[in-house]
Amino acid sequence: MKYIFIPALLIAFSTATLANEKQDKREVLLDNSDVEVVRLIYPVGTESGMHSHIHPNRVVYFVKGGILELVPTDKNQQPKIINVADGKTLFLPSATHNVKNIGNTEVVIVETEIKSK
């Protein structure tokens, strides 16, 4: 039984590791009743996965810019491609989307969402 368990555990671990390699890296820097600030790192070829921004006021600062594809949940809408330089700041409305790094450089952003009261 022990000999079957170990290979099964290794397969499960390697599958989880491969799945995580395709995801962005997210670190919450501040989260309170007024604001949420997160650092997101998108290595080349990674994506966020479909997610929703529920707070209407969102500012994104690009520590390291690059080319991102914003894929909406609505299949009738076209994906939006943005090419952003280092140090650029954008206001982005709330949305449900998947963010993909389609460029050839790592993208690092700091995203600030102001929570409505």
Image: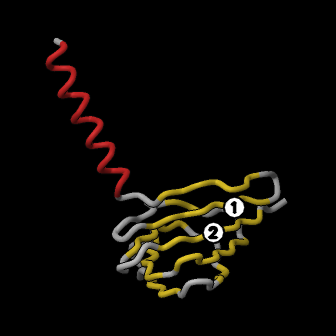
Locate residue 67: give its quadrant.
bottom left
Sequence-first tag of 2 and 1 = 1
Residue 7: x %, y % from top left: 17, 28
What residue lies at 73% left-to-right and 55% top-to-bottom?
30
Can residue 77 be seen in this snapshot? Answer: no
In the rendered structure, the answer to whether residue 30 lies left or right of residue 84 reads: right
Task: Tell me the colour scheme of the image.
Answer: secondary structure
Label 1 CA crowd tier, 10 Å (few <14, some 14–19, many 20+):
some
Amino acid type of the residue that numbered disc 2 sits on in the rendered structure? Val
Residue linked to disc 2: 110
Q: Are marks 2 and 1 in contact (CB under 8 Å)?
A: yes
Amino acid on which the number 1 mark rests in the picture = Val
Residue extending farthest right: 117
Q: Residue at x 80, y 62 (%)?
A: 116
- Give the residue at mark 1: 37
Residue 51 spot, x, y in % from top left: 51, 60
Say which quadrant the C terminus sits in: bottom right
When asked about the image quadrant of residue 79, the answer is: bottom left
Q: Is residue 60 visible?
A: yes
